[in-house]
Amino acid sequence: MPELPEIEIIKRDLGPLVAGRKIVKVKIIPDPGGIRALRRYPSQQKFSRRVKGSIIKEVKRRAKYLLFPLSTGDSLIIHLGMSGQLLYRGQTGRLEKFTRLIFKLDNGHELRFVDPRKFGEIYLYSVKKGDTEIEPSALGPEPLGKGFTTASLRSILKGRGRPIKALLMDQRQISGIGNIYSDEILFMAGIHPLRPASFLGEEEIKHLYQAIREILTKAIKYRGTSVRDYRNGFGNSGGFQSRLMVYQRGAERCLRCQGIVRSLKIQGRTCCFCPRCQS
DNA sequence: ATTGGGACCTGCTCGC
DNA sequence: TGCGAGCAGGTCCCAA
């Protein structure tokens, strides 16, 4: 479900609420198909034991991952997959359908991991030796980070023959961008999604860089995009969906030129673009 | 080394 | 109204 802006909003919402809170109990909802959220972790019992009693020091974000450094030295790492939500709720509230895991806090509230499609994952990562097997795979630079420049983008594109759209969504190259924002970024930059990455000229690289920064920044400003499932830490929708220019607008008229927005499959994902505005 | 395709899940919408 | 097909903010794994 969520890309960088949505995760960033959840981080900002949850941070002040859960930082300094102790996790007094971990409740895992039984599932006949197995607890898929913990599939990278060897044992549910061990997971609960290691998390219980620890204090959440802060909430951080890396790419599309939420990180919760704990007082024990471990870090709880949560990825929401396609349809996941992490909700901060009072204990009295009705439990959402597809709640998979609950972290009960010492202030009477709880963090609920809700995940209909079970694509989400929870890791417990320790810097201690012999416990690195649950570290997320290598991630590319943060596109909103200080270190990410037109020069870094240029070097990422260099020698890559694949469609620029596919490259933007590759977390090992640049992290945090998914299907919605890659469509929007390419529209803003005026670049056709199938263009081979290495064929972009210097001007196009500059436009692409600016579009990456601007789209992601704006999406955060408007609190993310809710197409269907995305909710922030309070269960509220985002506000960027009304500002989308091409995503999910296939066969509709382009908001800029009135031409017809086209759609095609790239890397198994539906990609929308305007052939007149993007070349 | 890179790249594309299928698999993993469940629910919803659309067309017949 | 009912049913199947196709689609959905992601990532891993494998084969070419």
Image: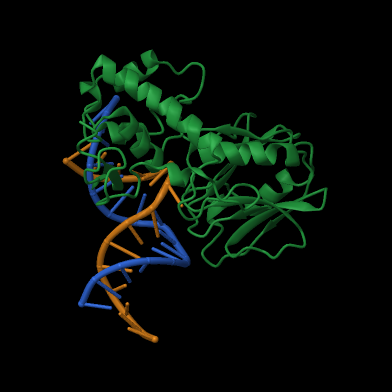
Chain colours: A green, B blue, C orange
> Residue drawn 49% across and 33% down?
A218
Residue shown at 68% from the left, 41% from the top:
A14
Q: Does residue A64 show up?
A: no
Taking depth in this image into account, of A143 and A267 the one nearest to the observer is A143
Residue A215 position in % (x across, y down): 43, 32
Q: Name the foreground residue: A207 vs A20.
A: A207
Query: From the viewer's perspective, is A207 left or right of A70?
Result: left
Side of C16 where A217 appears, left or right:
right
Looking at the image, residue A162 lies above or below residue A199: below
A118 or A268, which lies in front? A268
How many labels sit on residues? Answer: 0
Q: Is residue B1 left or right of residue A218?
A: left
Quadrant where the C terminus of chain A is found in the figure: top left
Q: Residue furthest right?
A: A107
The residue at the point 26 percent across, 47 percent down is A253
Asked if one can make out residue A111 in the rendered structure from this viewpoint, the answer is: yes
Q: Position of residue A186 (x, y in %)?
A: 31, 33
| Relative image position of residue A113 (x, y in whole percent) | 62, 53
The residue sitting at 71% across, 44% down in the picture is A50
